[in-house]
Amino acid sequence: METEILEQLNPRQREAVLDESSTCVVNANVGSGKTTVLIAKLLYLYYVKNIRYSQMIVLTFTHKAAEEIRNRLESREGSLPPEQLAGFGTFHSVAYRLLKQTLPVEELGYTREFTVLLPEQELELAQELIRQEGYKIKYPARLPKRLETAQRLGVRDKDSVEGKRLDKLQDDIWQLAEALEREKRRRNTMTFRELLKNAESLLRKYPIAPKWIVIDEVQDSDEQQLAFLDALRGRETRLFAVGDPNQIIYGWRGSSINACFTLVHRYGARELTLPMNYRSGSRILAAAGRFKQYGDGLTGSRDSAGQIRIRQAYDPLGEAYYLAEQIRGLHQCGTALEQIAVFYRLQAQAQQLSDVFTREGIPHLVVTRRERDSGETYLEEEGIALYGAGGGTCGREEECPALRDGARERKEGSGVRLMTLHASKGLEFTHVFIIGVNYGLIPLHSSGFEEEEEERRLFFVGMTRARDFLELSYYTQPGIPRVVPGESRYLQMIPQKLVERVEPETMTGSVNTAEENISERGEPAGAEQGVETEKQPISPCRVRHAKYGVGTVVEESPESVTVDFGELGTKTFMKDFVSLEPVYS
């Protein structure tokens, strides 16, 4: 059995699976097969070391990851009883089950029938208390963040630096935070953040001491999650954590930038590395390596070099039409639509893409990544939840989709994926287009070194989603506030030998039928220089305009050309001032 488990692993992966250190932190490069290692580790512990699954805690950051681990175990084992996998899930779902089934939650003033309060519901409850008690709260728009800080600190830390900063407005924020805590207990409900906090508190008094704790994507851990982990661990518990500090992209929600390193120093962990990338072509890896911040360069295992293009776009509308045409061509040549993705920095960029793709008949899904409180993540496509989405007050676990690890991905149809760089984490595609690589979008304007470093890591994550093809584009006329025209410095950081620069083809002369060539001077074939020719209809010819996309030439003269852009209408341009690219299809 040991040989069977290990035979598909490379030497570095095998070393990680066989490691029995008290604490082992595996720095897994992007695409290095970390899930394969995690599954092999669990199988090795179960079959070779005789550790039952019920004696393990396996923590992930998304329901998708938890479900993948469960499915891969059950594909080998067959259906496993729920009690065997009770310790498998996201941080929050494991804490939830411990409070429901194991820990004496009554000591904290709750009953086992407690419900889970979603963030928006907690805010509504706070606003209800403000109205009822007449609390004075300044700047209501800042209430969610200030309230979270007051709850996290508690009155005991009111005199801390952070507490004094909160006190500057001299309102009733502390009284509101205390009243809210009392009201939640009275209503027998707690937030996602409090699931971890309450479970940690009880675990320190009533330890469960699993034999092994295995953590996926440990780099995304924040201080509360690390504290929960610390409380879970007994004296004899062994810890195996896999992560990549180059993929920390949630600093805005309080991720510990040094989570991997914190574990190493806190527990004296042994550090291992998975250096081999099995996903991307070597050229893509070399380009992405310019944005890698920790560890050695990326090493690829594939023969394919991959293709990288840098392209100039006029504006977002023209870009959308260009992408629609490119995707149509890829699909006609056999590329599955679900293997094509378009990444952008801000969710607001999705609407125009979606509108144009709908108009052009390109099947697509707008994917968003949302978070529950301090990090519970799930994906949504076109507003319909895939993993762990839910609304309303969650009661029993089977009624609480945000905590349920069994949520299945919606399988209705296929289409190109449109998503932010944040949402792309953990996914992969054969063809990736990253748009808007302008300063002010990629990267966003940063107020300090840490934000700038996070922007670089985010770009790194986006680039490394691509297997075979990566196109990076920028706008000369972005038309978006605070976005600078022209390519950002990120594109200039990529060695030019790795990329193909695709400059827009210009056509400043006449547009002719498919059977004719465009003359060097841009004059209609047969026209004499200096002799004005009457405007007359011509055979249809497809052209691309940077703003209006692809259209059909319906009329031209020596000075002008008229193009029908379908729903966008018919436009007439002066040839001296327009750039039209012929489309041959």
Image (cartoon, rainbow, N blue to C red):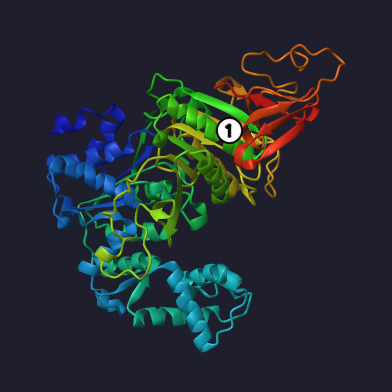
Q: In which quarter of the image is residue 181?
A: bottom left
Q: Quadrant of residue 504?
A: top right
List x then y, in percent, for residue 498.
Answer: 55, 22
As helix, strand or loop, the secondary structure at mark 1 comes to helix
Which amino acid is tagged 1? Tyr
Q: Please report the residue visible at 86 percent of the width from the left and 16 percent of the height from the top.
A: 531
User: From the viewer's perspective, is 86 left or right of 520?
Assistant: left
Which of these two is toward me, 164 or 57?
57
- Please tell me whether residue 23 is drawn above or below residue 118 in the rendered image: above
List x then y, in percent, for residue 86.
Answer: 21, 57
- Please tell me whether residue 83 is drawn above or below residue 488 in the rendered image: below
User: From the viewer's perspective, is 339 left or right of 400?
Assistant: right
Q: Quadrant of residue 233?
A: bottom left
Q: Please report the residue visible at 15 percent of the width from the left and 44 percent of the height from the top.
A: 46
User: From the viewer's perspective, is 216 left or right of 532?
Assistant: left
Q: Please report the residue visible at 21 percent of the width from the left and 55 percent of the height from the top.
A: 210
Q: Please report the residue visible at 59 percent of the width from the left and 74 percent of the height from the top.
A: 140
Asked whether residue 519 is in view, the answer is: yes
- Please tell me whether residue 543 is drawn above or below residue 163 in the rendered image: above
- Please tell me whether residue 505 is drawn above or below residue 220 in the rendered image: above
List x then y, in percent, for residue 378.
Answer: 39, 53
Asked whether residue 215 is in view, the answer is: no
List x then y, in percent, for residue 31.
Answer: 38, 34
Which of these two is toward me, 345 or 537?
537
Which of these two is toward me, 334 or 209?
334
Q: Name the residue under label 1.
A: 322
Which quadrant, please, contains the N terminus? top left
Which quadrant, please, contains the C terminus? top right
Label total for image: 1
**Furthest residue to the bottom?**
133
